[in-house]
Image (spheres, rainbow, N blue to C red):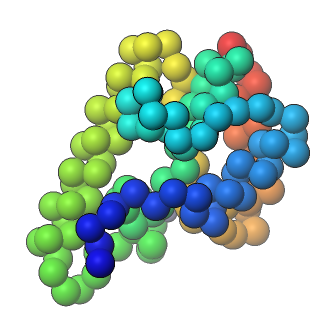
Amino acid sequence: MMAAVRHFDTAPELKVRSFLHRAGFRFRVHVKNLPGRPDVVLRRYRAVVRIHGCFWHGHEGCRKGLLPSTNRDFWSQKIKRNRARDQRTGRELQAMGWRVLTVWECDVRTTRAPFVLRRLAEMVAASS
Ligand SMILES: [Zn+2]
C-alpha cells in the first residue's frame, strides 16, 4: 500500500499552484530533469517551490509529522531517508543557482494559509 511514496497533486500542492497562478505567476510542475523533481518551477524567477507533506517529509515540531505508534522503526527509517533526500536535492538545486522555497502541508491547511501564500509570492518575486 505504501510502496509509492510520492504523492502528486495533493490538496496542499493544488492550493499553492492555484494561488500562484491566480497571482500571475507562470510555472511548470514536477520537472523531471531537476534534482528531486520539484513540485513547482518558476524559471523566470529562478525559484522552485517544494510543497512538503508533514508526515512524509518529517516536519519537525509538527503534530502531523509525528510517527505512528506501530512500526516506528520502519517509519522513522523511511522518513529519515526522505529528509536526507530533500536536503541533498535542495543543495543540488542551490548549486545550480535555484532558490529553493519550501511550503509545509500544515501551513496551507489552516487559517494561516492566506498569509503563508502571500509571503511565498513575495519571496518568489523578491529576486531573480
Ligand atoms: Zn507540519
Residue depicted at x 60% and y 40%: 29
Instruction: Report the side of 16 relative to 25 (left or right).
Output: left
Q: Quadrant of residue 9?
A: bottom right
Q: Quadrant location of the C terminus?
A: top right
- Could you say where residue 72 lies in the image, as x and y percent from the top left? 17, 77
Residue 104 in view of the camera: yes
Q: Quadrant location of the N terminus?
A: bottom left
Q: Quadrant of residue 40?
A: top right
Farthest residue toward the bottom? 70
- Could you say where residue 101 lies in the image, as x and y percent from the top left? 56, 36
| Image mark count | 0
Q: Nearer the viewer, residue 11 or 88?
A: 11
Residue depicted at x 66% and y 27%: 42
Farthest residue toward the left? 73
Q: Quadrant of residue 93?
A: top left
Q: Nearer the viewer, residue 123 or 28?
A: 28
Q: Is residue 90 above or below residue 9?
A: above
Instruction: Report the side of 89 relative to 74 (left or right).
Output: right
- Could you say where residue 8 lies in the image, as x and y percent from the top left? 51, 57
Residue 123 in view of the camera: no
- Could you say where residue 76 lies in the image, as x and y percent from the top left? 19, 65
Residue depicted at x 87% and y 45%: 22
Q: Is residue 59 above or below residue 123?
A: below
Residue depicted at x 28% and y 51%: 82
